[in-house]
Amino acid sequence: MNFVITGTSKGLGKYLALSYLSEGHSVAGCSRSESTIEHPLYSHHQLDVSSENDVAKMIRKVVSDHKVIDALINNAGRASMNHILTTPSRTADELLRTNFLGTFLMTREVGKQMCRQKKGAIVNFSTVAVPLALEGEAVYASTKSAIETFTKITAKELGHFGVRVNAVGPTPVETDLIRAVPPQKIAEIIDQQAIKRMGEAGDVKNVIDFFISPASQFITGQVLYLGGVA
Protein backbone atom coordinates (compact mmCIF):
# COMPACT_ATOMS: atom_id res chain seq x y z
CA MET A 1 0.00 0.00 0.00
CA ASN A 2 1.01 3.62 -0.51
CA PHE A 3 0.45 5.81 2.56
CA VAL A 4 0.41 9.55 3.12
CA ILE A 5 0.93 10.33 6.80
CA THR A 6 1.15 13.84 8.24
CA GLY A 7 3.25 14.85 11.23
CA THR A 8 5.87 12.13 10.86
CA SER A 9 8.83 13.84 12.54
CA LYS A 10 7.93 12.53 16.00
CA GLY A 11 5.27 10.94 18.19
CA LEU A 12 2.42 8.90 16.75
CA GLY A 13 3.13 10.02 13.20
CA LYS A 14 6.69 8.73 13.31
CA TYR A 15 5.57 5.51 15.01
CA LEU A 16 2.92 4.89 12.34
CA ALA A 17 5.30 5.65 9.49
CA LEU A 18 7.97 3.31 10.82
CA SER A 19 5.40 0.58 11.50
CA TYR A 20 3.98 0.65 7.98
CA LEU A 21 7.46 0.86 6.47
CA SER A 22 8.47 -2.24 8.44
CA GLU A 23 5.49 -4.03 6.91
CA GLY A 24 6.74 -3.25 3.40
CA HIS A 25 4.46 -0.31 2.58
CA SER A 26 5.55 2.98 0.99
CA VAL A 27 5.08 6.10 3.10
CA ALA A 28 5.12 9.76 2.09
CA GLY A 29 5.41 11.79 5.27
CA CYS A 30 5.54 15.45 6.13
CA SER A 31 6.28 17.85 8.96
CA ARG A 32 7.56 21.37 9.52
CA SER A 33 10.98 19.96 10.37
CA GLU A 34 13.43 17.85 8.40
CA SER A 35 13.04 14.11 8.13
CA THR A 36 13.90 11.94 11.12
CA ILE A 37 13.26 8.72 9.17
CA GLU A 38 15.76 6.99 6.90
CA HIS A 39 14.18 4.22 4.83
CA PRO A 40 14.22 3.39 1.09
CA LEU A 41 10.40 3.35 0.96
CA TYR A 42 10.02 6.68 2.76
CA SER A 43 9.85 10.15 1.20
CA HIS A 44 9.71 13.29 3.32
CA HIS A 45 8.14 16.65 2.51
CA GLN A 46 9.01 19.60 4.73
CA LEU A 47 5.95 21.82 4.88
CA ASP A 48 3.17 23.37 6.92
CA VAL A 49 -0.05 21.37 6.46
CA SER A 50 -2.04 24.61 6.62
CA SER A 51 -0.30 25.90 3.46
CA GLU A 52 -2.55 25.25 0.47
CA ASN A 53 0.28 25.52 -2.05
CA ASP A 54 2.63 23.25 -0.08
CA VAL A 55 0.01 20.54 0.38
CA ALA A 56 -1.02 20.60 -3.29
CA LYS A 57 2.63 20.42 -4.37
CA MET A 58 3.31 17.46 -2.06
CA ILE A 59 0.35 15.44 -3.27
CA ARG A 60 1.17 16.12 -6.92
CA LYS A 61 4.66 14.74 -6.25
CA VAL A 62 3.33 11.68 -4.43
CA VAL A 63 0.90 10.91 -7.24
CA SER A 64 3.66 11.37 -9.83
CA ASP A 65 5.90 8.94 -7.94
CA HIS A 66 3.38 6.28 -6.90
CA LYS A 67 0.32 6.78 -9.14
CA VAL A 68 -1.96 5.50 -6.36
CA ILE A 69 -2.58 6.67 -2.78
CA ASP A 70 -4.23 3.92 -0.76
CA ALA A 71 -4.46 5.57 2.65
CA LEU A 72 -4.22 9.05 4.16
CA ILE A 73 -3.63 9.38 7.89
CA ASN A 74 -4.23 12.96 9.07
CA ASN A 75 -2.14 12.73 12.22
CA ALA A 76 -0.58 16.21 12.35
CA GLY A 77 -2.01 18.21 15.21
CA ARG A 78 -1.34 20.65 18.00
CA ALA A 79 -2.72 20.81 21.52
CA SER A 80 -2.96 23.56 24.11
CA MET A 81 -4.42 23.69 27.59
CA ASN A 82 -5.75 27.11 28.53
CA HIS A 83 -8.78 28.46 30.32
CA ILE A 84 -10.92 30.22 27.74
CA LEU A 85 -10.33 33.58 29.48
CA THR A 86 -6.55 33.26 29.14
CA THR A 87 -6.36 31.78 25.64
CA PRO A 88 -4.53 34.10 23.21
CA SER A 89 -6.12 34.50 19.79
CA ARG A 90 -2.77 33.45 18.32
CA THR A 91 -3.08 30.07 20.03
CA ALA A 92 -6.63 29.60 18.76
CA ASP A 93 -5.51 30.46 15.23
CA GLU A 94 -2.59 28.01 15.34
CA LEU A 95 -4.82 25.18 16.58
CA LEU A 96 -7.45 25.84 13.95
CA ARG A 97 -4.92 26.06 11.13
CA THR A 98 -3.03 22.88 12.03
CA ASN A 99 -5.83 20.69 13.37
CA PHE A 100 -8.68 21.62 11.06
CA LEU A 101 -7.33 23.49 8.03
CA GLY A 102 -4.45 21.03 7.63
CA THR A 103 -6.82 18.06 7.73
CA PHE A 104 -9.16 19.78 5.26
CA LEU A 105 -6.41 20.57 2.76
CA MET A 106 -4.86 17.11 2.89
CA THR A 107 -8.25 15.43 2.60
CA ARG A 108 -9.23 17.62 -0.34
CA GLU A 109 -6.03 17.07 -2.31
CA VAL A 110 -5.69 13.34 -1.58
CA GLY A 111 -9.44 12.96 -2.03
CA LYS A 112 -9.16 14.17 -5.63
CA GLN A 113 -6.73 11.36 -6.41
CA MET A 114 -8.70 8.73 -4.51
CA CYS A 115 -11.87 9.67 -6.37
CA ARG A 116 -10.03 9.18 -9.67
CA GLN A 117 -8.87 5.79 -8.41
CA LYS A 118 -12.37 4.90 -7.18
CA LYS A 119 -10.87 3.68 -3.91
CA GLY A 120 -9.03 4.84 -0.80
CA ALA A 121 -9.27 5.18 2.97
CA ILE A 122 -8.81 8.34 5.03
CA VAL A 123 -8.36 8.33 8.81
CA ASN A 124 -8.63 11.58 10.77
CA PHE A 125 -7.68 12.24 14.38
CA SER A 126 -10.15 13.36 17.03
CA THR A 127 -9.67 12.99 20.79
CA VAL A 128 -11.52 11.85 23.89
CA ALA A 129 -11.45 15.51 24.95
CA VAL A 130 -14.53 15.92 22.74
CA PRO A 131 -16.94 13.46 24.42
CA LEU A 132 -15.49 14.21 27.86
CA ALA A 133 -15.83 17.99 27.31
CA LEU A 134 -12.56 18.52 29.17
CA GLU A 135 -12.11 21.83 30.95
CA GLY A 136 -9.07 23.78 29.84
CA GLU A 137 -9.30 22.39 26.32
CA ALA A 138 -12.14 24.45 24.85
CA VAL A 139 -10.33 25.49 21.67
CA TYR A 140 -8.43 22.23 21.16
CA ALA A 141 -11.53 20.07 21.68
CA SER A 142 -13.54 22.39 19.43
CA THR A 143 -11.09 21.92 16.56
CA LYS A 144 -11.38 18.16 16.99
CA SER A 145 -15.17 18.33 17.22
CA ALA A 146 -15.01 20.09 13.86
CA ILE A 147 -12.92 17.19 12.57
CA GLU A 148 -15.65 14.76 13.60
CA THR A 149 -18.31 16.69 11.70
CA PHE A 150 -15.92 17.02 8.76
CA THR A 151 -15.34 13.25 8.84
CA LYS A 152 -19.05 12.42 8.75
CA ILE A 153 -19.87 14.81 5.92
CA THR A 154 -16.85 13.98 3.75
CA ALA A 155 -17.68 10.28 4.19
CA LYS A 156 -20.99 11.03 2.46
CA GLU A 157 -19.47 13.26 -0.20
CA LEU A 158 -16.70 10.82 -1.13
CA GLY A 159 -18.53 7.55 -0.55
CA HIS A 160 -19.98 7.56 -4.06
CA PHE A 161 -16.41 7.27 -5.37
CA GLY A 162 -15.42 4.31 -3.19
CA VAL A 163 -13.51 6.48 -0.71
CA ARG A 164 -14.05 5.91 3.00
CA VAL A 165 -13.43 8.46 5.79
CA ASN A 166 -13.30 7.61 9.50
CA ALA A 167 -11.74 9.04 12.65
CA VAL A 168 -9.97 7.68 15.72
CA GLY A 169 -10.21 9.39 19.11
CA PRO A 170 -7.20 8.45 21.23
CA THR A 171 -6.94 8.70 24.99
CA PRO A 172 -3.69 10.24 26.33
CA VAL A 173 -0.68 8.58 24.69
CA GLU A 174 2.88 9.27 25.84
CA THR A 175 3.95 11.76 23.17
CA ASP A 176 5.07 15.39 22.97
CA LEU A 177 1.42 16.36 22.51
CA ILE A 178 0.69 15.80 26.21
CA ARG A 179 4.11 16.64 27.65
CA ALA A 180 2.84 19.89 29.19
CA VAL A 181 -0.34 18.35 30.62
CA PRO A 182 -0.16 18.05 34.45
CA PRO A 183 -0.06 14.44 35.71
CA GLN A 184 -3.20 15.09 37.78
CA LYS A 185 -5.09 16.06 34.62
CA ILE A 186 -3.99 12.87 32.89
CA ALA A 187 -5.09 10.84 35.93
CA GLU A 188 -8.52 12.49 35.85
CA ILE A 189 -8.97 11.59 32.18
CA ILE A 190 -7.92 7.98 32.74
CA ASP A 191 -10.36 7.74 35.66
CA GLN A 192 -13.22 8.50 33.23
CA GLN A 193 -12.25 5.62 30.95
CA ALA A 194 -13.71 2.12 31.21
CA ILE A 195 -10.18 0.75 30.79
CA LYS A 196 -8.07 2.73 33.21
CA ARG A 197 -4.63 3.06 31.67
CA MET A 198 -2.68 5.29 29.32
CA GLY A 199 -3.15 4.65 25.64
CA GLU A 200 -0.32 3.16 23.60
CA ALA A 201 0.71 3.85 20.03
CA GLY A 202 -0.18 0.28 19.13
CA ASP A 203 -3.75 0.85 20.32
CA VAL A 204 -4.11 3.69 17.84
CA LYS A 205 -2.54 1.73 14.98
CA ASN A 206 -4.93 -1.14 15.64
CA VAL A 207 -7.91 1.15 14.98
CA ILE A 208 -6.28 2.59 11.86
CA ASP A 209 -5.52 -0.91 10.57
CA PHE A 210 -9.19 -1.78 11.05
CA PHE A 211 -10.40 1.32 9.21
CA ILE A 212 -8.08 0.89 6.21
CA SER A 213 -8.52 -2.87 5.89
CA PRO A 214 -10.23 -4.14 2.71
CA ALA A 215 -12.51 -6.07 5.08
CA SER A 216 -13.85 -2.70 6.34
CA GLN A 217 -15.17 -1.48 2.99
CA PHE A 218 -18.68 -1.08 4.46
CA ILE A 219 -17.47 1.16 7.29
CA THR A 220 -17.31 4.94 6.85
CA GLY A 221 -18.25 8.13 8.68
CA GLN A 222 -17.41 6.62 12.07
CA VAL A 223 -15.55 8.00 15.11
CA LEU A 224 -14.01 5.38 17.40
CA TYR A 225 -12.82 6.46 20.85
CA LEU A 226 -10.27 4.41 22.74
CA GLY A 227 -10.35 3.36 26.37
CA GLY A 228 -14.12 2.84 26.66
CA VAL A 229 -15.01 6.53 26.44
CA ALA A 230 -18.42 7.28 24.95
Image: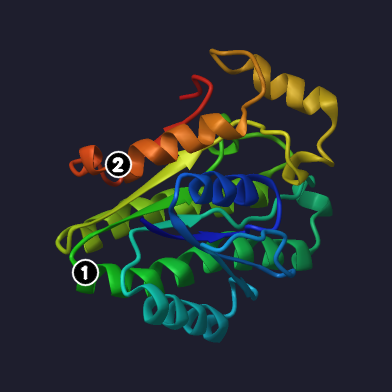
Q: What residue did someone put label 2 on?
A: 213
Mark 2 is surrounded, within 10 Å at the Cα level, by few (under 14), some (14 to 19) or many (20 or more) other residues, namely: few
Looking at the image, which residue is at 66% across and 32% down?
Answer: 172
Q: Secondary structure at mark 2?
A: loop
Mark 1 vs mark 2, CA separation in Å: 17 Å
Residue 29 occupies quadrant: bottom right
Residue 114 occupies quadrant: bottom left
Q: Amino acid at mark 2?
A: Ser
97, 120: nearer the viewer: 120
The N terminus lies in quadrant: bottom left
| Residue 117, label in figure | 1
Is residue 103 in sight in this rendering?
Answer: yes
> Do the numbered discs 1 and 2 sit on residues whose CB atoms are within 8 Å?
no
Q: Amino acid at mark 1?
A: Gln
Of callouts 1 and 2, which one flags the residue occurring earlier in the amino acid sequence?
1
Is residue 131 in sight in this rendering?
Answer: no
Does residue 137 sit above or below 201 in this rendering?
Answer: below
Q: Position of residue 171 (x, y in %)?
A: 60, 31
85, 40: nearer the viewer: 40
Looking at the image, which residue is at 33% across and 69% down?
Answer: 111
